[in-house]
Amino acid sequence: MKTALVTGASSGIGKAIASALIDQGMTVIGLCRSVAQLPDGVTPLSCDLREESAIRSAFEELEALDILVNSAGLAYLARICDGDPSDWEEMWRVNVHALGLCSQLALPLFPESGGHILNLSSMSGHRVPPTGGFYASTKFAVRAVSEALRAELKSLGNKTRISCLSPGFVDTPLLEKYFAGREDQLAETRANIDMLTPEAIAEAAVHILTSPPGVEINDILMRSADQAM
Ligand SMILES: NC(=O)c1ccc[n+]([C@@H]2O[C@H](COP(=O)([O-])OP(=O)(O)OC[C@H]3O[C@@H](n4cnc5c(N)ncnc54)[C@H](OP(=O)(O)O)[C@@H]3O)[C@@H](O)[C@H]2O)c1
């Protein structure tokens, strides 16, 4: 039976992926702060990903892993021209720094034959939305970290596979934060776009994580059929 660690398993995409991996018969550990919100059957691992020491302590509790899903993340509307740099800092720490550190700490826990890391990037990691502010830079960075790690592992002969998922709008609590102060825009977006569901993203995650040995799906770009950009 495979063991998967899913960060951000208390909400949205991470929660749907954790449930889908349970349905696949895996043992799933959910890393987040709101452990009471984890889906049934997920083993809680409480951790604030803004704190490097907390991440290191959490990983000390783990013995072996086959899969790491880095789904934890957040999006503030924090513009470069006048946004709050503390919002940039929090997004950078959770979306990029913690993702890199969790990946580094997971590697020694993977089997000799290699594990699998799945990182949540975004369509905002492929093109910069005009209102995306600092957030898009973190999602471009997720892809850069993924590519860099893949190259490093190949040079070390490590068989661990690195994948990304890059969704457009997914209807989760993240959007409330992203659209804070421009709720009318969120309502308009919801009216115009039948957004992707977390379950649709989880289906793609299962496809990636159950692909045959030797197949490394590098990225899947997914948008609602209504989303133009
Ligand atoms: N929703 C979208 O439209 C969309 C589109 C493309 C990509 N994505 C990406 O998909 C991923 C998941 O987003 P989502 O929409 O599912 O968001 P969500 O519903 O808001 O869930 C975010 C998750 O991240 C965790 N998290 C945030 N800050 C944390 C911290 N300091 N320490 C530990 N955990 C923390 C939260 O757990 P706790 O609060 O319990 O700690 C929660 O489980 C993110 O990386 C996001 O950038 C989302």
Image (tube, rainbow, N blue to C red):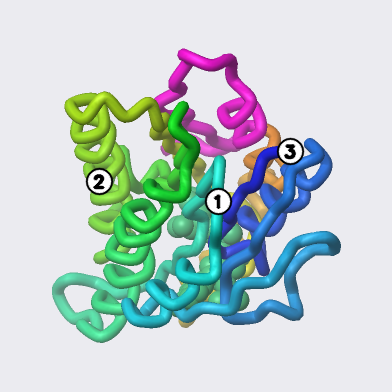
Give amino acid for label 1: Ala
Give amino acid for label 2: Val
SS category of the residue bearing label 2: helix
Q: Which residues are magenta?
A: 204-229
Q: Marks 3 and 2: which is nearer the front?
A: 3
Disc marking residue 146: none
N-terminal-most mark, 1 or 3: 3
Can you say which quadrant of the picture contains the N terminus?
top right
Residue linked to disc 3:
1
Dominant SS in magenta = loop
Question: How far apart are labels 1 and 2 at the CA level?
Answer: 23 Å
Q: Residue 206 placed where, x, y %?
A: 66, 33
Residue 174 visible in the shown view: no
Residue 123 visible in the shown view: yes
How crowded pointer 3 is (Cα within 10 Å; few <14, some 14-19, many 20+) is rated as few
As drawn, is 118 to the left or to the right of 45?
left
Res 224 quadrant in image: top right
Residue linked to disc 1:
64
How crowded pointer 1 is (Cα within 10 Å; few <14, some 14-19, many 20+) is rated as some
N-terminal-most mark, 3 or 2: 3
What residue is drawn where x is 67% and y is 68%?
A: 10
Which residue sits furthest left?
81
Residue linked to disc 2:
145
Res 2 quadrant in image: top right
